[in-house]
Amino acid sequence: MKIAVSGKGGVGKTTVASMLARLFASDGYRVVAIDADPDANLAAALGFDDLEGITPISEMKALIEERTGAKPGTFGAYFKMNPRVDDLPEKLSREKDGIRLMVMGTVKQGGGGCVCPESVLLKALVTHLLLYKKDMVIMDMEAGLEHLGRATVKAVDKLIVVVEPGRRSIDTANHIRSLASEIGLTKIAMVGNKVRNPTDEEFLRKHLSEYEILGFVPYDDRIMEGDLNTEPPYAGLDEFPQGIRDAYAALRTDK
């Protein structure tokens, strides 16, 4: 399966992505976890060490020039639109407990959608991972879906939008659905996070009635403490929350 996880900043999409990756890996799947969020917190959420030593691919200037033929940050230069990337997942990823992690980073110039050597390499790499790798792929994304395009959208089995009880989170979810529809991505589902009580759950059900809801994850101080201590969100838990297990079961049934 190929799963993309998105949502408003701070709703817990990295928490959801990391727990799903861990569940799939524990069941024997070969998992590739892609951090395509500019905040790049997936490595910590998965328990990887030496976080300061992880360089996002978008910042690997020598590699980008080697593969595209142009220096990052240059304008008006000719460069390859289909650089070779098939060897990069093994060269640039880190592995821990059955999960292979790749940190993409983001393009910081000319608007997120600029056609430049960095963006071309990143999109080529995402295309390769989604279309040609036979592994389970889970991509932690920003709300803008910047790394996806029409070439890869058919490979995504499910776009999971993480929402929390609140109007702004609902608005962001609707914006993400609008962006997804523009590129033809219609397989969308929701995971409610930080749900404190039945009233919160009812709020989400009411405002997300048009969506498939995979599960509701309760608010838990232990998950928040893990984030503050740069630990995996599940580090202090005896077992994964029921909402995450519900989402995992639904995704496996979908498969």
Image (tube, grey):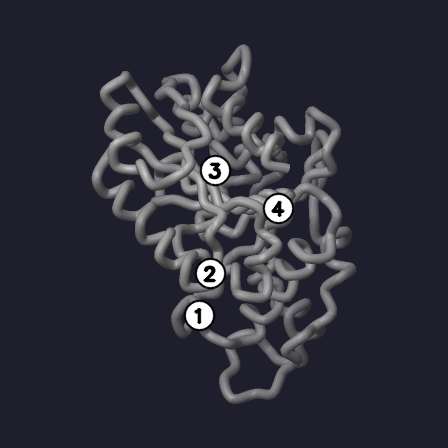
Mark 2 near mark 1, Cβ–Cβ under 8 Å? yes
Mark 4 near mark 2, Cβ–Cβ under 8 Å? no
Horizontal and vertical percent for residue 241? 48, 18
Q: Residues within 10 Å of mark 2 (few under 14, many from 20)?
A: some
Give the amino acid type for the residue marked by disc 3 in the picture.
Thr
Relative to 26, say whether 103 is above or below.
Answer: below
Question: Which numbered mark, 3 or 4, is in the foreground of this view?
Answer: 4
Task: Give whichever of 193, 77 is nearer the camera.
Answer: 193
Taking the image as shown, residue 25 lies to the left or right of residue 150, namely right
Report the residue marked by disc 3: 14
Dot placed on the residue nearer the N-terminal end, 3 or 4? 4
Question: Which numbered mark, 4 or 2, is in the foreground of this view?
Answer: 4
Report the residue marked by disc 2: 146
Dot placed on the residue nearer the N-terminal end, 3 or 2? 3
Residue sitting at x 69%, y 36%: 99
Alpha carbons under labels 1 and 4: distance apart: 23 Å
Position of the C terminus, as image quadrant, is top right
> Can you tell which mark lies on residue 35?
none
Q: Residues within 10 Å of mark 1 (few under 14, many from 20)?
A: few
Report the residue marked by disc 1: 113
Element type at mark 1 = loop
Report the residue marked by disc 4: 2
